[in-house]
Image: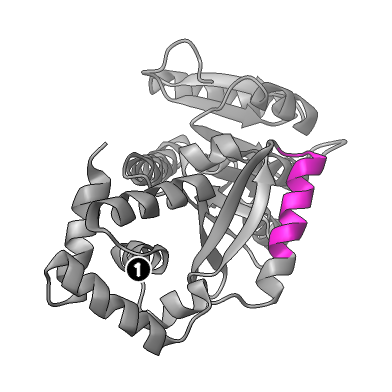
Amino acid sequence: MKSPDNQQTVVLVVDDAIDSIRMISDALEAAGMTVLVALDGGQALTISQNITPDVVLMDALMPNMDGFETCRRLKEVPAFTDVPILFMTGLSDTEHVVMGLNAGGVDYVTKPINTAELLARIDVHLTNARMARSARSALDSAGQNLFAVDRQGQLLWATPQVSRCLPPTPSNEAEGLRNQLGQWLDHAPEPGHSLPLTLDGTPRSVEFLSLVDHREYLLRLKTPQNQNSSAARLRDRFQLTLRESDVLLWIANGKTNREIGQILDMSPRTVNKHLEQVFRKLGVENRTAAAAIAIRLLAVA
């Protein structure tokens, strides 16, 4: 949750140097921001259990848990997916800059801190983060339950609805899901292929959509019952067979004959035969018209 005053930008400053915290806090508060302070990584993780700040300023070197490990732990929390973490480091600490970016940080500022530069960088990253959150909320509103993982199945980002369905991290359930997804991705599934699984006792499936930039595996979380219900509506409305309704549903989801064949375990030629019957029963001549009719029907609550 946010701080009581949702209108103000909330900044979490993680630093063990009191003088540095005082100087940064004065500048941020003068700019109208709310400042939370953690003197080490453990305090930062404790704060993150109850409050999700808008941005985090992270000192690289701290006792007990350093800034890099703290950043990695924070980024395991779904609520921190879009929270920009900026590292604070010394002028000559190039290796620390690289370590910070690899840990999940988006930028760095050098000590001694130039407050004008700091505020400018915060503003840029806040704008980007809010645009990302807005885009994912829009995908949620459109019913696109999307998320992305890396090759090992580690979550990179998720739309809000998917985040609510996924197990909390860290947990045995989250680790089990990561391993399950990683093993599935090792077999290089084709677009449209699905992995059945159970989340919180609910049968679901994960559909592989595409590989983005050779690193992000874009996935869609689905409830099989919803898919079956959609196919049943198409079947009842247009007097289709079971296979014809399945083919039409995937046409409405933008799949090609080859992809549908892979999903339904049939040849593209067989898919085309079913499509011929679908076109006849719908009174249309092509897949675009058939998809439009199906989408209009399924869009009606």
The residue under the point 36% across, 65% down is 241
Q: Position of residue 133 (x, y in %)?
A: 40, 41
In-front residue for pair 286/174: 286
Secondary structure that dominates the magenta span = helix
- Residue farthest along the top direction in this orientation: 4
Q: Quadrant of the C terminus?
A: top left
Foreground residue among 20 and 155: 155
Residue 292 in percent (x, y) is at 18, 61
Q: Nearer the viewer, residue 88 or 12?
A: 12
| Residue 70 position by quadrant | top right
The answer to whether any part of residue 66 appears in the image is: no
Q: Position of residue 164 (x, y in %)?
A: 56, 34
**Residue at (54, 20) in percent of width and height:** 1
Q: Give, as a single range, the part of the protein colored magenta.
A: 169-182
Q: Is residue 44 left or right of residue 260?
A: right
**Which residue corresponds to mark 1?**
244
Q: Is residue 72 visible?
A: yes
Question: Residue 64 falls in which quadrant of the image?
Answer: top right
Determine whether the residue tagged by mark 1 lies in a helix, strand or loop: helix
Give percent across and percent down for residue 289: 14, 68
Q: Amino acid at mark 1?
A: Glu
